[in-house]
Amino acid sequence: MTEFTPSAAQAAAIAAIYAVEVTDFVNTYEYEVPDEAERALSVFRELKIVDAPGSPTIGEACAPWVFDLAASIFGAYDAETGRRLITEWFVLIPKKNSKSTIAAAVMMTALILNWRQSAEFTALAPTIEVAGNAFSPARDMVKHDEELDALLQVQTHVRTITHRESGATLKVVAADSNTVGGKKSVGTLVDELWLFGKQSNAENMLREAIGGLASRPEGFVIYLTTQSDDPPAGVFKQKLQYARDVRDGKIHDPRFVPVIFEHPPEMVERKEHLLRENLALVNPNLGYSVDREFLDREYTKAQQGGEESFRGFLAKHANVEIGMSLRSDRWPGADFWEPQARKGTNLDAILARCEVVDVGIDGGGLDDLLGLSVVGRDAESREWLSWSHAWAHPSVLERRKSEAERFRDFARDGDLTLVKQVGDDVADVAAICAEIEEAGLLDKVGLDPAGVGSILDALVQAGVPQDKIIGVSQGWRLGGAIKTTERKLAEGGMWHDGSPMMAWCVGNAKVEPRGNSILITKQASGFAKIDPLMALFNAVSLMALNPAAAEKSFWDI
């Protein structure tokens, strides 16, 4: 039998016939294709916002973006396989954009539609107060709906809602190791993630909380938060950066959805994110739960309240990330610190470009940071270039628990080294100073005269000439260096590496007026560390003496 090979025209005709037949076959049957998103939205829309005038339903009172978010969460569930195709959502929205209502409605919808017997749904709050605020909308949704009240049991004293038929529960808990340990949650909502970023054990705690996803393929986790009122830290900083990287295409993760209401980089660069008229771009509920008149009034009040107040307003109502804290008693140089950051101003760049280098060192206690700052004078422009680093012992993480997560962030950034044993920090500092000396660029190393014994010995042992190691007077005598630093920054004659660690230290510095001088002390800053900044002042005090350019380096031979 010869094989039949149709011509192009014959093949097209045969395909057309089959297409008609297939269409006719499909049309003879009624296929019910479940739409999980629409099914969930039919529940979601009917939930009541009790504390709004007239107690409208979500369907009546919410902006379209809320339904888009809910549709993405519930539409990601594949009913045929019982698997959720997207498992994580990160939502960053300003205050007053119905965050608590959205959280309650999403978790209530998940509880109502759940098929797993005795399933657990958990809303994690960082504090008892936040937990109470998160539970109230969910409780009211049940109590003011006869049908839901018959279906669900509310136990206010333990902040729990139980499905009477499936036994599934929604619990709102103030998170700690005891409350989240061993959780097998099908769905977890983490409320106010920015506050978790300030807790030392938050990363491990959240890992415990979402551990149930491993055995529950339909599970999900939602991180719902406003921007931090301090520079982002800890687990919040990590999740925020990951979400931005997914959004920007730097990370490919199809199971993660970032929903971030913040101004695009080009607007930030042009300072347009600070303008009143651009608040609307990042407040999706404007005209719904967010009143325009309220925003305008608060904007004006914050502007009149000074830099610190204005930054706080922008953080909470415009999702503007705070790079450094600017308090009313701040060091004046802090106002000019951020604009003088120049990427790539590291130690190698200083050694390559500068004609002379001074080093400042400060700190080093077991419950303290050891700070080092290198200041070089550019051989061509004569601008000052600075680079700073810090070291800490593991004991600092225990003694300074309030800052432990921030220190770990700095370590991940490469700006702080967590040493494993006592003495490693001093050895590293000495090695850097010796490298500068070997390059033929070292003028002087300036130290706080108090408690310099071990550092002095390490420097000499590393090959730094002892006559180049000097004590720098502290207290009011350091006032000249402090003034010089702020003037150099204000004039644009000094650049730094832009490290988050130094921005934090600069933001921590508090000024104490003393007669005609000013004083910046570690005592005034309290637990907030400033050792690397004090090291910078030590280095500046030496560079301000206008040292002669070093002789030609052996690197140049």
Image: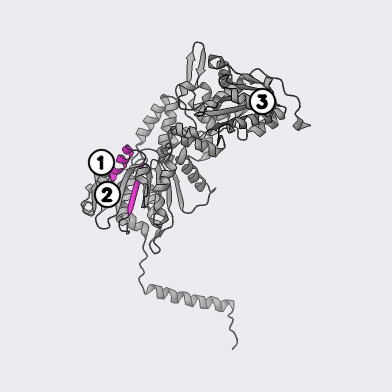
Q: Nearer the viewer, mark 3 or mark 1?
A: 3
- Residue drawn 40% across the image and 37% down it: 195
In the displayed structure, 408 sits above or below 117; it is above
Whether residue 360 is situated above or below residue 61 in the rendered picture: above
| Residue picked out by circle 3 | 460
- The residue depicted at 51 percent of the width and 16 percent of the height is 518
- Residue lying at the far bottom of the rendered structure: 1
Q: Residues within 10 Å of mark 1 (few under 14, many from 20)?
A: few
Residue at (44% x, 30% y) in the render:
311
Q: Give the position of the C terminus as an image quadrant.
A: top right
Q: Earlier in the sequence, mark 2 or mark 1?
A: 1
Q: Quadrant of residue 179?
A: top left
Would residue 458 be seen by someone viewing this image from the given angle? yes
Label 1, on which residue? 53
Counting from the top left corner in percent of width and height, residue 60 is at: 30, 48
Q: Pick the residue in front: 208 or 518.
A: 208
Label 2: state its secondary structure: strand
Which residues are the magenta region?
115-138
Of marks 3 and 2, which one's residue comes earlier in the chain? 2
Q: Tag on residue 161? A: 2
Q: Amino acid at mark 3?
A: Val
Q: Position of residue 462 (x, y in %)?
A: 67, 29
Q: How many marks?
A: 3
Q: CA distance from mark 2 to mark 1?
A: 25 Å
Q: The residue under label 2 is which amino acid type?
A: Ile
**Horizontal arrangement in the rendering, residue 179 relative to residue 508 (left or right):** left
